[in-house]
Amino acid sequence: MKERRYDIDWVRVIATLAVFIFHSGRFFDKLDWHLKNVQQSFFLTMFVGFLDLWMMPLLFLLSGLGSWYSLKFRSSGQYLLERVKRLLIPLYTVGAFILLPPQFYFELVNHGRDVRSIWELIPPLYGGPLRFSLDAPYLINLWSGHLWFLQFLFIVSLLILPLLLYLKSNPGRHLIARLADWSDCRGGIFLFLIPLILVRICLRGFFHGAHTWADLFYYAVFFLIGYVIAADIRFTEGYKRLGWVFLVLGIASYAGEGALIIGFHYPYPGAESFSWTYLLFNIVISIGNFCWVMFILSLTAKYMNFNHKVLTYGNEAVLPFYIFHQTIILCVGWFVIRWNIGIGPKYLIIALVSFALIMALYDLLVRRLNLARFFFGMRPRRSLK
């Protein structure tokens, strides 16, 4: 059996913590969110913008990478059942009826709505009929908060499953081998940028804002890249060799994105219309997304391919941690942003208190109980100690 890639496990933990750090800072950036501090910080706006450049593309790539290993040992039906258990059950149980209502309450109150009944906060009711919507890539008409990721990931897994199965076949493996041959050449791994840039350019002008069909297909490309690079070790060797190239290009693209948004008032994410600026921005941000993801993968592949008890614990905790995190952050922030202290102390208090609460809830209520594990998308424990 092939040795486990511990570096990938470390990346999964790092990416989840990055999302936590990102949302802990959303009270203080200059963009709209569910709750906002009275004062905002330009520095934190730039910081969360940097995290936003790579954290979700990285999570989708890791999900694709994991799907390669999953489909090595599962049939397509078993794979989809595992996706349902891991993604949809948490979303439509503890997510929809326990964790999302408080978030939606903060969203409504922050935007001036008077909430008079708890029934206004139950997602399947306030979202309208339980139906698939063509306006956005969701399974049902549901306000999903940060759990949009679970919906997107399930839809991506479902839509591209035929392609994943093809890539497992002999012709598909031959295609992957050819891609690996090209990746072995200097700069060959940058071929993955072509579909990313094309999808962004072709779709962003039609679907405006965040979490649209354009984002779904863009993230699907990252998912597919993860699936492909898991199939051949030459991809790993390729991005390990180019780590510092990815870093330089990532820094340049982040600077370019900031210049276009701040200096040229590019409306991202918003009503982006076709223009030369549109083409330039989508090329720049695609390069940034890809290069930061590859730089992080290259660092962990070089220096973090080892096991540790912290990794064993953290790798199992990533999904329930993600499911819990934004609701807990908002509940803590609801009180802290009212205090008469500076932005820095508020940020630290929100992050530290929220992290402690999330870990306590996970360890005491989820990790030890098989019924709770089921509702948080986790496998049952055989021995509960």
Image (cartoon, helix red, strand yellow):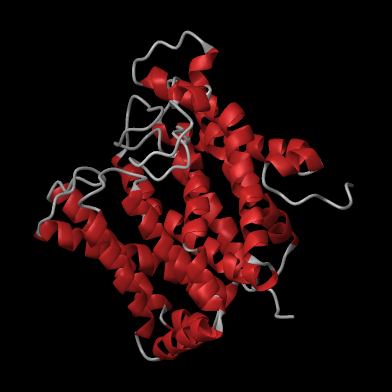
Which residue occupies 50% across, 29% down?
Answer: 330
Q: Is residue 98 left or right of residue 186?
A: right
Which residue occupies 10% across, 60% down?
Answer: 276
Which residue occupies 23% across, 53% down?
Answer: 258
Q: Nearer the viewer, residue 294 or 83?
A: 83
Which residue occupies 22% across, 49% down?
Answer: 206
- Is residue 280 among what the camera can see? yes
- Quadrant assignment, res 203: bottom left
> In the image, residue 328 lies at what x, y percent?
57, 32
Q: Nearer the viewer, residue 73 or 17?
A: 73
- Name above or below for residue 9 compared with residue 41: below
- Name above or below for residue 59 compared with residue 272: below
- Is residue 255 among what the camera can see? no
- Name above or below for residue 295 compared with residue 140: below
Report the residue that reaches farthest toward the top.
Answer: 116
Q: Nearer the viewer, residue 190 or 22?
A: 190
- Name above or below for residue 10 compared with residue 313: below
> In the image, residue 355 lies at what x, y percent?
60, 40
> In the image, residue 236 lies at what x, y percent?
51, 80
Q: Is residue 216 left or right of residue 306?
A: left
Q: Is residue 47 left or right of residue 22?
A: left
Q: Which of the image's four quarters has the N terminus?
A: bottom right
> In the image, residue 335 lies at what x, y percent?
51, 21
- Quadrant assignment, res 41: top left
